Image (cartoon, rainbow, N blue to C red):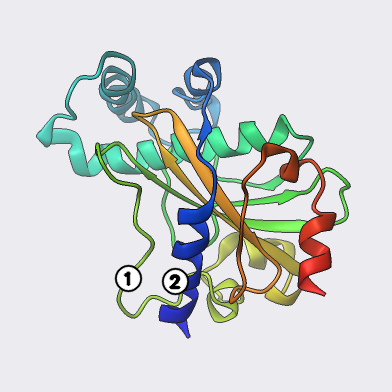
Amino acid sequence: MPSLVRAVTQLALRRATEFTIPEETLQGTLTATPVLIRDPERLALLEAAVKEVLTEGAPLPAAVRSSALPVLGNIAEAVVETLLADHGWQPVYDDSQGFSSGSGVDLLMLDPTLSRLVAIEVKSTIQQGRWPRLARGPSKQLTPHWLDGPRNTGMAEWGVPSASVYLMVAQVHLRRRRWRCCLAGDPMAPQPVTEEQQLDDLDWLAAIST
């Protein structure tokens, strides 16, 4: 099942429209809130390197590459959260530490009607010429088993089962300032988002999922 979920999700993402990330949105996500960070000095150094990559086109220094990738992931999550908030979505759970880590969902948000909870997985890259990949191998990511797992902090914290949430997978290309996504009521039937207006009202998705 994990391989099938990955395959249908990848197909839906390929069919999704690429939307532009406004420059002001990206700039507003490049620095985490200092009071929420366990190691602000270390993060400040990494954020400086990341900012050079994203605003000046500099290569990511090899010495900080492995440490900077979680920072890039956190920026991508903040970008998606901000873009969805612009459509009226409300955040319920996110990672405020400045580092994207862990094995659970990246975000939990309520849709604009505040009646549907959406678990959001964000994939990001700065590599030219490709979109970020979904998890491969034995990973159960995006499956109900994964959503309901004890290591899925956001889901466990709010006590919601996989059957009670919709699922979004978003791909973010930070260098190109582009993103795309798909939504699902059933992980085996994700739907590409082809118009931004689809994010304003999920009735279309609910109709497909029933």
Q: Amino acid at mark 2?
A: Arg
Residue 72 placement (x, y as % from top left): 36, 37
Q: Nearer the viewer, mark 1 or mark 2?
A: 2
Q: Where 42 falls versus 1 (above or below)?
A: above
> Dots 1 and 2: beta carbons under 8 Å?
yes
Q: Amino acid at mark 1?
A: Arg
Q: Which residue is mark 1?
A: 136
Q: Residues within 10 Å of mark 1 (few under 14, many from 20)?
A: few
Q: Which residue is mark 2?
A: 6
Residue 197 placement (x, y as % from top left): 74, 39
Q: Is residue 190 left or right of residue 141?
A: right
Q: Residues within 10 Å of mark 2 (few under 14, many from 20)?
A: many
- Which residue is located at x 55 percent, y 22 percent? 25
Q: Work out whether residue 204 or residue 123 is closer to the camera in this orientation and state it.
A: 204
Identify the image quadrant of the C terminus.
Answer: bottom right
Q: Is residue 124 left or right of residue 165?
A: left
Q: Work out whether residue 194 or residue 25 is closer to the camera in this orientation and state it.
A: 194
Residue 87 placement (x, y as % from top left): 75, 34
The furthest residue to the left = 62
Q: Where 16 falls versus 148 (above or below)?
A: above
